[in-house]
Amino acid sequence: MRLPSYLALASLLGLALGLSSLLGCASSEPARFYVLNALPNPAGATGETPGESAIGIGPITLPEHLDRTQIVTRTSSNEMNLSEFHKWAGSLRDNITQVLAENLSVLIPTQQVRIYPWKRATHVDYQVTVEITRFDRQEGGDSVLNARWSLLAGDGKTELLTRSSSFRSHPAGEDYPATVTAMNETLEAFSREIAGAIKSLR
């Protein structure tokens, strides 16, 4: 049975759209996923040593426009680009928290590092709270980490110091792997500043 001409035309259009959609999916860029990495742990640095400082990390906060899957690039002071194909492999906030904790365990050094929230009965000598206000890359420029942070006594109430810090690193290239590497470098510099402050108080 022959279809009326308008039905035949509709069928052809539907087929064309379907093929176009399939071709579009086949040619789209595959997503790539990234994580931030901690400093390597020195060989033999395992187990707690009597007298080590116990460090509590967190809470750590990020603005909503940064705490997302997509990697953020600033295209101007008021405009940002969210990459659909270059993404964090998990929660950026959780990744930052974990890296800071691991970095401090290496830099201080101590094996007694707790991540917020810890149990009420858990003892810490110092607590580090962080509010990250910027953690991105200026298009064609530096990766930047800006943060306000406080170092508290173990009771979580007595403020020992509060600082605003800013770190910059120029990526080796324009691509996203270079951007993530530079972001990692700013986080390492931040870790070193926190570790230095804790050591000075000890």
Image (cartoon, rainbow, N blue to C red):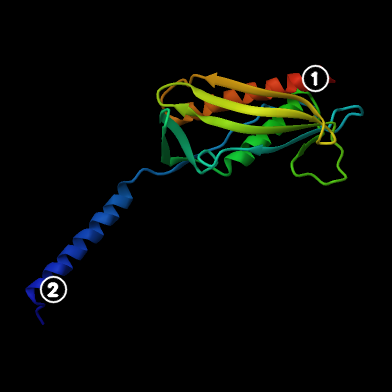
Residue located 27% across and 56% down the image: 21
Under mark 2, the amino acid is Leu
Could you tell me which residue is drawn at 55 percent across and 41 percent down? Answer: 67
* Residue 42 in view here: no
Q: Position of residue 153 (x, y in %)?
A: 83, 30
For the residue pair 159 and 137, the one nearer the viewer reads as: 159
- Picture coordinates of residue 33 (x, y %)? 50, 40
Q: Quadrant of the C terminus?
A: top right
Left or right relative to 164: residue 158: right
Asked if residue 61 shows in the view, the reply is: yes
What is the spatial separation of the Cα atoms under label 1 and label 2, in whole angstroms? 78 Å
Q: Quadrant of residue 29?
A: top left
Residue 17, image x and y in percent?
A: 22, 59
The picture quadrant where one finds residue 9 is bottom left
Q: Which structural element holds mark 1?
A: helix
Residue beneath disc 2: 7
